[in-house]
């Protein structure tokens, strides 16, 4: 390790020898936190204008800082900014360049703040913008799902429990179940945004600052609802990032469940739907293959998002107040979670509206597996049988159908009366798939009229969100 004093560090006054070259690389974060450059500049501008408002900066110094930061943003946008690992992170890179451009005024920008509150502010600004983008894609996916559901309020398919045929439902009802999951995810995302939207700027290193700063000024300038209340907590906690990753884990779990169904439904064995070619790939050896790669990959990406959530929880679990270098490890899992969620939603928002259901195949599948057995039991209850007795009667009828290879609706009235003499001709009205779904005509049921109304309500919710 070099014994020469390093004069390049903006914090180097206390040190008598240069940082070890490996340690310099090991501790640097500029390789990944440079993506927050725009937020760092935004925060610095708000801070500088606040310093001018309390007479810490002169008008000329503020003008120099504003011009210098504009020049730096231009260099970054054009790809001409020279990032240096020796300057550790995005904050020091920008500050060093600002000082090189405008001189002493650049050194005054950091008055009344620390990298601790600076990075806490930058992350919140970055995540807030990411949440807004993700909310847009999530809404777009919901719109596509609702539109597809509204177009298939009478398309009958088998509903499953244990992946066994249970009762018939309409395809639109199934799609609106997806939307319910996504709507709760949207609510969680907005809850996360509300809690993170407080400004830590001005908390400084951990205890605040002796300068006459105006934290409400910077909070308002940056679009925060208010400043954070406690300087120690402001710089040290990352629960807002953990909360976002918890939202992301739940959202990706829902997308994974949807993926599993799309993979099954598009298989030759189910053949319920056709996925657009542009969301599938082929095989290098089997020319007949059409692989549902997008749903499979989204299903696979849940693992990395869940892993990032655990990583951030583990990162925070033993940290004493206030800031610790551990928190440099918060950004890569957070950034990757943001990217993964946004890309997965974008893929699904594009793909779901283009799904083509195969109505005849689904209808025929719903006829198999005795999906109207519960309807027959309900019919017998209306005749006066206790439900458990009706259950027993229908069970025997199903056993007979399995033995002779006939669905309940294919049996003759005489055959059905062998199991219960009270059965009449009108039984066939409840044994049809159409009769079964239509009978479930209540809020939350799969009756076509209910599904139509549910789609209208869901669309209204999404539209109201966009109008607000």
Image (tube, rainbow, N blue to C red):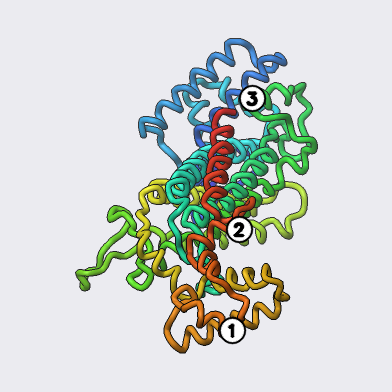
Between discs 1 and 3, the one toward the N terminus: 3
Asked if 75 appears above or below 348 in the picture, the reply is: above
Residue 307 location in percent, x, y?
56, 62
Q: Which residue is mark 2?
A: 309
Residue 428 location in percent, x, y?
51, 68
Q: Is residue 431 visible?
A: yes
Q: Which residue is mark 3?
A: 47
- Left of 133 or right of it: where is 422? right
- Left of 41 or right of it: where is 388? right
- Left of 316 or right of it: where is 85? left
Quick one: 416 or 119, which is closer to the camera? Answer: 416
Kind of element beneath mark 3? helix
Q: Residues within 10 Å of mark 1 (few under 14, many from 20)?
A: some
In the image, farthest residue toward the top = 59
Q: Is residue 23 visible?
A: no
Kind of element beneath mark 2? helix
Asked if 353 appears above or below 197 in the picture, the reply is: below
Quick one: 252 or 366, which is closer to the camera? Answer: 366
Inter-mark Cα distance, 1 to 3:
82 Å
From the viewer's perspective, is the residue at label 3 or at label 2 nearer? 2
């Amino acid at each position: 390790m070099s014994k020469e004093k390093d004069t390049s560090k903006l914090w180097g006054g206390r040190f008598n020898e240069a940082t070890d070259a490996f340690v310099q690389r090991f501790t640097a974060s500029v390789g990944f936190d440079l993506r927050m450059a725009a937020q760092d500049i935004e925060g610095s501008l708000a801070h500088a204008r606040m310093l001018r408002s309390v007479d810490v900066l002169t008008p000329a110094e503020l003008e120099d800082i504003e011009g210098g930061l504009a020049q730096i943003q231009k260099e970054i946008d054009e790809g001409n900014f020279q990032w240096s690992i020796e300057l550790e992170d995005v904050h020091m890179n920008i500050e060093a360049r600002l000082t090189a451009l405008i001189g002493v005024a650049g050194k005054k920008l950091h008055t009344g703040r620390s990298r601790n509150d600076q990075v806490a502010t930058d992350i919140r600004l970055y995540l807030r913008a990411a949440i807004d983008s993700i909310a847009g894609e999530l809404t777009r996916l919901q719109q596509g799902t609702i539109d597809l559901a509204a177009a298939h309020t009478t398309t009958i398919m088998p509903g499953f429990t244990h992946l066994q045929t249970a009762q018939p439902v309409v395809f639109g009802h199934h799609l609106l179940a997806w939307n319910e999951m996504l709507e709760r995810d949207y609510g969680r995302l907005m809850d996360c945004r509300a809690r993170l939207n407080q400004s830590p700027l001005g908390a400084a290193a951990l205890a605040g600052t002796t300068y006459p700063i105006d934290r409400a000024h910077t909070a308002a300038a940056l679009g925060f609802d208010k400043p954070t209340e406690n300087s120690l907590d402001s710089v040290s906690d990352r629960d807002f990032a953990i909360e976002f990753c918890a939202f992301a884990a739940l959202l990706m779990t829902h997308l994974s469940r949807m993926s599993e169904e799309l993979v099954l439904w598009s298989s030759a064995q189910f053949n319920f739907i056709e996925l657009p070619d542009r969301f599938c790939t082929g095989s290098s050896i089997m020319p007949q293959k059409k692989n549902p790669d997008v749903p499979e990959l989204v299903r696979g990406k849940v693992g990395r998002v869940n892993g990032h959530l655990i990583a951030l929880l583990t990162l925070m679990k033993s940290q004493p107040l206030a800031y610790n270098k551990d928190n440099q490890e918060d950004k890569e899992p957070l950034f990757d979670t943001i990217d993964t969620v946004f890309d997965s939603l974008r893929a699904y928002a594009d793909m779901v509206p283009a799904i083509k259901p195969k109505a005849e195949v689904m209808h025929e599948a719903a006829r198999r597996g005795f999906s109207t057995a519960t309807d027959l039991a309900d019919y017998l209850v209306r005749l006066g049988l206790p439900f458990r007795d009706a259950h027993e009667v229908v069970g025997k009828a199903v056993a007979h159908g399995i033995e002779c290879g006939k669905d309940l609706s294919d049996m003759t009235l005489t055959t059905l009366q062998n199991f219960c003499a009270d059965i009449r001709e009108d039984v066939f009205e409840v044994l049809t798939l159409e009769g079964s779904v239509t009978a479930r005509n209540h809020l939350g049921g799969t009756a076509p009229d209910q599904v139509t109304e549910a789609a209208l309500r869901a669309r209204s919710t999404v539209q109201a969100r966009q109008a607000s």
